[in-house]
Amino acid sequence: MTDAISCIACGSAGVRVFMEMERAPVFCNQLCHSQPEALDAPVAPIKLGYCDACGHVFNVVFNHSLLEYSPEYENSLHFSAHFQQYADQLVRELRNRYDLRGQAVIELGCGSGAFLRSLCAGTDTRGYGFDPSYQGQTDERDGVRIVRESYFDADVVTPALFCCRHVLEHVEQPADFLAAIAGKLAGDSAPSVYLEVPNVLYTLRDGGIWDIIYEHPSYFSPHSFSRVVAAAGFSQLDVQETFGGQFLSLHAVVSGSANRADATPAAPKDVSARIDRFANDYREKVDQWQTDLEKWRAAGQRVVVWGAGSKGNSFLNVVPGASHITHIVDINPGKHGKFVAGMGQQIVPPEFLRAE
């Protein structure tokens, strides 16, 4: 038990460290333009701690000063047909759940703006997006305006719906961040809020170990997610596992006051037990991949990784022997010709496989 560490989600003491990684790329999704640049990319350690009080998992040695998001950051999943199907379904669900016609929608951390534009398309809904990594024009098009400035400094209308998808896990102090959102949204209109984060139960329960990256200081469970959102000033929480259990989706409204009573559902009883054995399970999975890579290399077989996102980057940086892999395939044309941070594999299009 490490009494000196306090939980960044609920503030409770008694966080215990259960897993350590000596080095991980600070950025998995920062595009490197040469192999030397990729090999020289900054790395840092990860130490995962678990809070018994709320079930939150977080990197206890996370250093936000190492991160600076820029237009070179590329983590869009919309080139995946499977993910796009999920995003389209989410758009339909949000439109059916909330009356957005003639209203304003804000998305904090909108990336390329693809989801926001889809949500507003074909309606008179006005969209406002905020993201420091946005690469496009900041002028308004089709009722949507996206800027690189801070949402908290912007003078914008109170929206009917506020969205924040896959941002909270990147924030050093999620409780303060959510409280700031609630404070900015507070008013008579009580806007609806939709939040989405990766689900740590997928990592613990289903072996999604490649989702452990430095960019994510936080790994939310349903309980820790509900609790930190309620404590920040939101109510009427509805939390669901989505995208095959990989994500947590949360609907809420701004209440203006902290309310821990809304923090449901209860943490799963077996989470602590999974935490206790996770380091060993992680090591066994990495060792098995190392054995397989060595076997294939000894047999003269060539290995190419598919998917140059966070999971692919994590795999290449974690598994011993992955340095012998020379290429990684990705369907996102914006990544082609670039290199994987930390290990230096070149990112190539699917056509590369036919050419070889």
Image: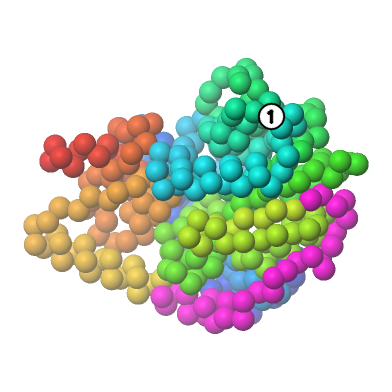
x 73%, y 72%: residue: 13
Where disc 1 sits, the SS reads loop
Q: Quadrant of residue 340?
A: top left
Give the magenta-colored segment's residue range.
253-281
Amino acid at dot 1:
Thr
Q: Position of residue 293 (x, y in %)?
A: 21, 62
Q: Is residue 277 above or below residue 164?
A: below
Q: Which residue is mark 1?
A: 125
Identify whether 68 is placed above or below 143.
below
Q: Nearer the viewer, residue 250 or 181?
A: 250
**Count of numbered circles in the view:** 1
Q: Is residue 356 a member of the stretch shown in magenta? A: no
- Identify the image quadrant of the C terminus: top left
Q: Nearer the viewer, residue 308 or 244?
A: 244
**Does residue 118 lie above or below 228 as drawn?**
above
Can you see residue 296? yes
Report whether 247 appears left or right of 334: right
Which x, y percent locates residue 24?
A: 44, 54
Residue 273 drawn in magenta = yes
Q: Residue at x 25, y 59 (%)?
A: 321
